[in-house]
Amino acid sequence: PLWCDKVLLRASRRVEIAYFSHSQITRLYSRFHSLDKGENGALSREDFQRIPELAINPLGDRIINAFFPEGEDQVNFRGFMRTLAHFRPVEDNEKSKGHDASEPLNSRNNKLLFAFRLYDLDRDDKISRDELLQVLRMMVGVNISDEQLGSIADRTIQEADTNGDMSISFSEFIKVLEKVDVEQKMSIRFLH
Amino acid sequence: MEDAWGAARSAAQVWLSLVVGLIMLPAMFGVSLGITETYMKVLIKTLKWATFRIQKGRRERETLKPSPSNGIIQRDDGSMEKEIGELRRSRPKRPDGGDFTLSDVFYFSRKGLESIVEDEVTQRFSSEELVSWNLLTRTNNNFHYVSLRLTVLWGLGVVIRYCILAPLRITLAAIGISWLVIGTTVVGLLPSSRVKNWLSELVHLMCYRICARGLSATVHYHNKQNRPRKGGICVANHTSPIDVVILANDGCYAMVGQVHGGLMGVIQRSMVKSCPHIWFERSEMKDRHLVTQRLRDHVNDKTKLPILIFPEGTCINNTSVMMFKKGSFEIGGTIYPVAIKYDPQFGDAFWNSAKYNMVSYLLRMMTSWAIVCNVWYLPAMTQMEGEDAVQFANRVKSAIARQGGLVDLSWDGGLKRDKVKNTFKELEQKKYSSMVVGDDSSD
């Protein structure tokens, strides 16, 4: 029930709590609970797909995937918050300092890593031509021919690839996007 | 033993005569004794005080004053072109205007995550969250213990609502429904004539008035000059089955619906004896032409009562109006739009059919403080030249949304149960493709 979990959360010292205020956690838990149709304390992929605006998002399936750890089919509330924490605005970093020496989840680097992982499905830390084509095809649907899409993919890899291995590594990814305002574009502002 | 039985019987007699004399008879004749008004005044004062106490308690605990808005996140509703254009700002513009960058995914990921935290559609299928607690257990989501007085008040409220108001309301509802069945059957025995129609309307009105009292419904009707007339179609936004009682309190309508079994079936069969309502068998509902034809025949007969239709097709939580199905707007005839807005402070009228069945829903209604709502009759609308049924439906929907202060959504209320159609995703993909290939693309 709603109350029990909240007590657990307050007592917990997980890193995710540092990213959200008490009232934000409450609202997110309400939302989690309303999505959890099976009422088993965890969300499945179907629970996400029930959101119409997400179902019509061309990258909907990839985004849903980002919530599920390797090989798992259920995500609990902590995992839910963990993924959402990537989208906290960067200046709200004060609370997250001091837990450990590693980078906060909503740093510029980690936001870029989130986007990188949307492409890099097999998690080999490289975006291959095939992986790029897959994402392109998801975004454009049937409206662009294979040849045209292929040449777009080739051009993109050519622009980004500096070490000539015909794929885009994470550091090459960062370099290409160094002028993009990642902090603002990959952030969600809460109202309270 | 005998004494106890005798005492119980006389108590029941007193109770019944009080109910009949003080509530039922005045209701039947549309007269008000002022009891409900006094109750509402006391209730409003109490709730105001409770709100004040809660806010004081909240302020003492947190330094930040939470804003009264119900949204969770700030949604930046920039268009796809604007947002992706900004993402691509640092790159040189290509001659054909199209481009692909690795950062294009940022737009879709942010939109996706925003919809996961808060979306426009799924929130409409569950009860609206209140900004401030109204002393009902069922709406107690985030409100912590504040003070002893408040808890005592809540406890008192429980006693009043469950032990005094609920039995009263159930009695009234039972009387109302039995009177409807008996009255309409009796009227149905008369031959067709003006007198029969007049009597039928009287019987219907009286029953709905008694039922309205059975819910402690306070309705404010606005713009009565626009009330639906014979041979027309009345359309309204749908929140619960109670909408019918609310509207029928101020006018007579021909109902449209599916034939049910059980008590509903009995009511339907007797109603149709006194004046023509339109009940469809389950199998008939699948045949759209048959449905439209029957409705058209009814509308074309100018002596028949206006039809009451809820084009959303399902109950929505009264914060928004969802897509109006075009079927009602293809019949022809004048449309009389009506906007219904309930005040959630006194009771949540939304029927969440996934969570509650009809009986538990009605019991919840009868144990709320009251049902308070506003009904606005809007000026009649007809289909304009060159406007198809869908556009007409959207025009009527916007008018109702604007009047009722509701959000105007194009999403289908059927999304409560069904998956969204793939065509919408294909639209998004098409939009994005034109940003990738630019202006001189060959489709």
Image: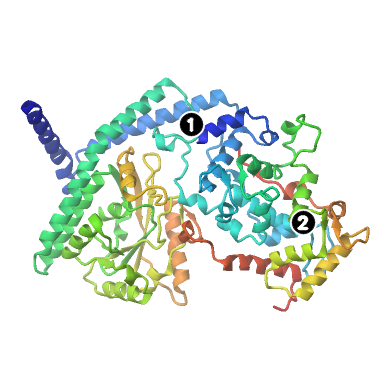
Instruction: Check the picture and name the quadrant holding the C terminus of chain A.
Output: top right
Task: Residue type at mark 1: give it.
Answer: Phe
Q: Position of residue B106 (x, y in %)?
A: 73, 54
Task: Residue type at mark 2: give it.
Answer: Asp
Q: Position of residue B254 (x, y in %)?
A: 26, 64
Task: State the mark number for residue B143.
Answer: 1
- Marks 2/1: CA distance? 46 Å
Task: State the mark number for residue A122.
Answer: 2
The structure residue drawn at horizontal position 60% and vertical position 37%, both measured from the top left corner, is: A24
Closest to the observer, A109 or B206:
A109
Q: Position of residue A159 (x, y in %)?
A: 88, 62
Pointer 2 chain: A
Q: Position of residue B113 (x, y in %)?
A: 65, 50
The structure residue drawn at horizontal position 40% and vertical position 34%, both measured from the top left corner, is: B137
Closest to the observer, B20 or B413:
B413
Closest to the observer, A56 or B213:
A56
Closest to the observer, B387 or B364:
B364
Quarter assignment of residue A148 = bottom right
Give the class, few, some or many, for how many residues have Cα within 10 Å of label 2's Cα (few <14, many ≥20). Answer: few
| Circle 1: element type | loop
The structure residue drawn at horizontal position 33% and vertical position 71%, both measured from the top left corner, is: B283
Does B434 sit above or below residue B63? Answer: below
Q: Is residue B40 visible?
A: yes
Quarter assignment of residue B97 = bottom right
